[in-house]
Image (cartoon, rainbow, N blue to C red):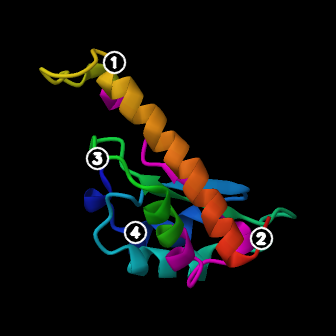
């Protein structure tokens, strides 16, 4: 399910009622991220049966071969921290990279283009998350 098909206003309140410690939420392809960040911040529970909930938000779109920069990742996380407690915020990719294994390869460059893109996206997510942590004053 793509985030454009999800009604987060109905889903998030009930999802965060589960006694689960963390949630991976597809958001890189979401058009109105601020609205979803706000809902996450509103419904994310500090105590889910003794465990604080953490929201790992999607900052990488695996369906698009354009590689997000570390700065874009940083900016998305810093923006999300305006709505979600920074100590309970993390980054992830939207739904993994399996589409790259079946993508039609371009007529130029390496036959491993999709794999190279996926690894660069992951590298940039890690670097951007570190930049955001530094900017937000968390280690």
Is residue 125 visible in the rendered image? The answer is yes
Instruction: Identify the mark nearer the N-term, 4 or 2.
Output: 4
Q: Viewed as shown, does residue 63 lie left or right of 14?
A: left
Q: Magenta stretch containing residue 78, yes or no?
A: yes
Q: Disc 2 designates what residue?
A: 138
What residue range appears in magenta? 77-100
Nearest the viewer among 48 and 87 is: 87
Q: Are marks 4 and 2 in contact (CB under 8 Å)?
A: no
Q: Give above or below for 55 relative to 136.
A: above
Q: CA distance from mark 4 to mark 1?
A: 36 Å
Q: Disc 4 designates what residue?
A: 8
In the rendered image, the residue lying farthest to the top is 111
The image's mark for residue 66 is 3
Instruction: Identify the mark nearer the N-term, 4 or 1.
Output: 4
Q: CA distance from mark 1 to mark 3?
A: 15 Å
Q: Disc 1 designates what residue?
A: 112
Could you say which quadrant of the image residue 40 lies in?
Answer: bottom right
Mark 1 secondary-structure assignment:
loop
Q: Magenta stretch containing residue 82, yes or no?
A: yes
């Amino acid at each position: 399910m793509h985030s454009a098909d999800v009604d987060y206003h109905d889903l998030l309140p009930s999802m965060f009622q589960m006694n689960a410690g963390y949630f991976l939420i597809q958001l890189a392809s979401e058009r109105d991220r601020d609205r979803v960040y706000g809902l996450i911040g509103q419904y994310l529970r500090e105590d889910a049966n003794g465990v604080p909930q953490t929201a790992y938000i999607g900052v990488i779109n695996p369906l698009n071969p354009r590689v997000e920069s570390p700065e874009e990742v940083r900016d998305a996380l810093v923006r999300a921290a305006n709505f979600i407690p920074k100590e309970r915020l993390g980054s992830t990719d939207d739904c993994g990279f399996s589409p790259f294994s079946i993508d039609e390869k371009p007529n130029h460059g390496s036959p491993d283009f999709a794999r190279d893109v996926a690894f660069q996206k992951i590298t940039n997510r890690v670097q951007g998350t570190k930049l955001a942590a530094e900017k937000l004053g968390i280690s």
